[in-house]
Amino acid sequence: MFTRVWKRVLLTTPWVVLCAASSLSSSPANATERHIDYSKVTKADGEVIKERYFRYLVIADDPCLTVQSFRLGHPGKPHREKFVCALGEARFDRDFALVDFKFVDFHDGHLHVEVEFIPARRGRKVVRWCSIALQPDSIGDLVCNR
Amino acid sequence: MFELLCVYQSMRLTCQKQDVMRGISAVLGGLMLVAFSAGASAPPIDYENVGMVGVQRVMGQWVRYIVLRGDSACVTVQIFKAANMEGLVREKTICSLGEMHFHRDFAFVDVWRVDFESDRLSLEIEFIRLRGSGHEVRPCSIEIGKGSIGDLECSLEYGSVYY
């Protein structure tokens, strides 16, 4: 009886591990395969920084700020892409009634953003100056001054 | 009997061939019609290739400008009913300054800056002429009316014509 159960465990375990691994590995892939409705873009601009063309996009009905980098001469597919949808642990769609990217500009290897935050529950609206570091192979997180 | 059958079969084949040819010509005709009618209207905007975009409320309507990435890109101006870019009222793609076409009559045209004003878009555009030396950066404007989009006007002298 024990051997039979042990055999069953041995047979099923690799499949369980494989399924768990594939579901874990698929999570980041899904995160990058986010659909962008380019026809609803309301703000965009681009600049060449350290041999990459960086572009930001603000899309209507989308709380996130999209930042993309392209290899020069390859404008078709982004080399890196980041959807800035949170400030630390606070998510734009859950923890704020409104997040408005009022002013966005490239300066000194960074994307400088003036953001208006209106909290979902209590509190007054706050306007903060924030920045995102842009490197040839990485797009940083949103960092705001206090 | 056999010969008669052959004649009948060959006639049927000829008819079938004619039908096929008619079908092909009809399809080709249809395709040409589609191609010509598509050519008559403005090509769709390649939104994935946007380089510079801005939206603002002008005269009670939502106005968006789009400049695509690429050489001598045109300026598209759109008027929408809603802030979320729904309900397109008017659209105009501007690729020329008067009679001068960006691609045909200039070596290079580059839109540097676009700003919103109360009744117009004010732009800063770099023009590089086909002949001659240097480049010129000129202030330009596109008038916005109630449901209307004007032409590009710049303070640029080209030959004996002042645009």
Image: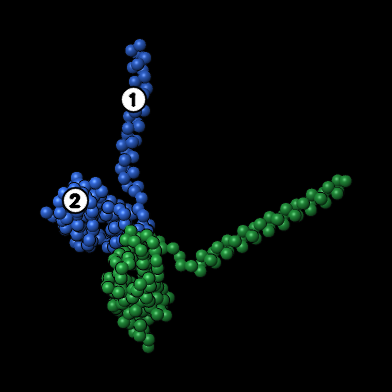
Chain colours: A blue, B green
Q: Which mark is residue B123?
A: none
Q: Chain of mark 1?
A: A
Percent position (x, y) of residue B80?
36, 64
Say whether residue A52 is left or right of residue B7.
left
| Front residue (pair A10, A88) | A88
Callout 2: few (<14), some (14-19), or many (20+) C-alpha neighbours within 10 Å? Answer: some
Which of pointers 1 and 2 lies earlier in the amino acid sequence?
1
Q: Residue furthest right?
A: B1
Say whether residue A124 is left or right of residue B47.
left
Residue placed at 35% from the left, 82% from the top? B163
Callout 1: few (<14), some (14-19), or many (20+) C-alpha neighbours within 10 Å? Answer: few
Q: Could you confirm whether marks 1 and 2 are on the same chain?
A: yes
Q: Secondary structure at mark 1?
A: helix
Identified by mark 2, the residue type is Pro
Residue placed at 36% from the left, 28% from the top? A15
Residue placed at 34% from the left, 73% from the top? B144
| Front residue (pair B144, B135) | B144
Q: Tell me the residue that label 2 is attached to.
A: A119
Total number of numbered discs in the rendering: 2
Comparing labels 1 and 2, the label whose residue is closer to the camera: 2
Identified by mark 1, the residue type is Thr
Residue placed at 44% from the left, 63% from the top? B44
Say whether residue A72 is left or right of residue B33.
left
The answer to whether residue A9 is visible is: yes
Pointers 1 and 2 in contact (C-beta within 8 Å):
no
The answer to whether residue B74 is visible is: no
Percent position (x, y) of residue A74?
36, 58
Q: Could you tell me how far apart the alpha carbons at marks 1 and 2 are, in whole angstroms?
A: 46 Å
Percent position (x, y) of residue B119?
30, 74
Q: Chain of mark 2?
A: A
Q: Secondary structure at mark 2?
A: strand
Q: Tell me the residue that label 1 is attached to.
A: A13
